[in-house]
């Protein structure tokens, strides 16, 4: 997997996971998903779903979760499995949608896994780790008040 920077969406196959998640949720219009994606070198990426897309994702999240990789009892062992969970959580975060607790838990677990040897392979690991920590902080800020209610 190639990386052009340190942010969540700076790797090959990161934001494009959102195509797969939306397809699994039953969304058929790939062009609309592409239109929802933004990426700038300075600001990074986000996928801003339309209200209709958000509804399809929320109503069919069980179909998406059914095909997600399962972490072992020790967490994640493969980078791409962790990135899948992180990107699913990022899709909810980008759209300020409340994900099921499983997505929050596995998304944070995945991000913590990526703070390890995955980050160490970057030319400046501290920049990658800082980006991952910012994501965890953002998740906690968005969902901290409701995590215990889920």
Image: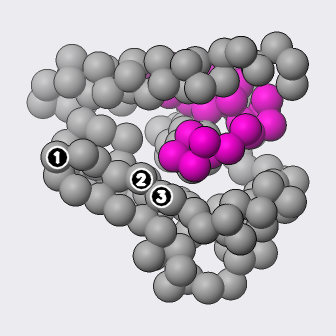
Is label 2 in contact with label 3 (beta carbons under 8 Å)? yes
Is residue 99 covered in magenta? Answer: yes
x, y percent for residue 15 = 44, 57
Name the secondary structure under disc 3: strand
Q: State the mark number for residue 42.
A: 1
Q: Is residue 19 above or below residue 89?
A: below
Question: Where does label 2 land, which residue?
Answer: 46
Name the secondary structure under disc 2: strand
Mark 1 or mark 3: which comes first in sequence? Answer: 1
Q: Is residue 58 above or below residue 35?
A: above
Span highlighted in magenta in the image: 92-116
Name the colouring of the figure: one colour
Q: Does 67 sit left or right of 131 as displayed?
A: right
Magenta: main secondary structure: helix
Residue 81 can be seen in this image: no
Question: Where does label 3 land, which residue?
Answer: 47
């Amino acid at each position: 997997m190639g990386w052009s920077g340190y942010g969540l969406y700076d790797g090959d196959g990161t934001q494009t996971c959102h195509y797969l998640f939306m397809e699994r949720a039953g969304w058929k219009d790939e062009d609309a998903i592409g239109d929802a994606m933004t990426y700038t070198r300075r600001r990074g990426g986000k996928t801003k779903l339309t209200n209709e897309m958000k509804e399809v994702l929320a109503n069919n999240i069980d179909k998406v979760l059914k095909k997600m990789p399962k972490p072992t009892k020790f967490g994640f062992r493969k980078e791409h499995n962790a990135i899948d969970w992180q990107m699913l959580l990022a899709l909810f975060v980008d759209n300020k949608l409340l994900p099921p607790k499983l997505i929050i838990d596995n998304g944070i677990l995945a991000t913590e896994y990526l703070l390890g040897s995955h980050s160490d392979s970057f030319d400046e690991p501290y920049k990658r780790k800082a980006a991952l920590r910012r994501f965890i902080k953002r998740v906690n800020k968005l969902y901290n008040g409701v995590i215990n209610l889920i």
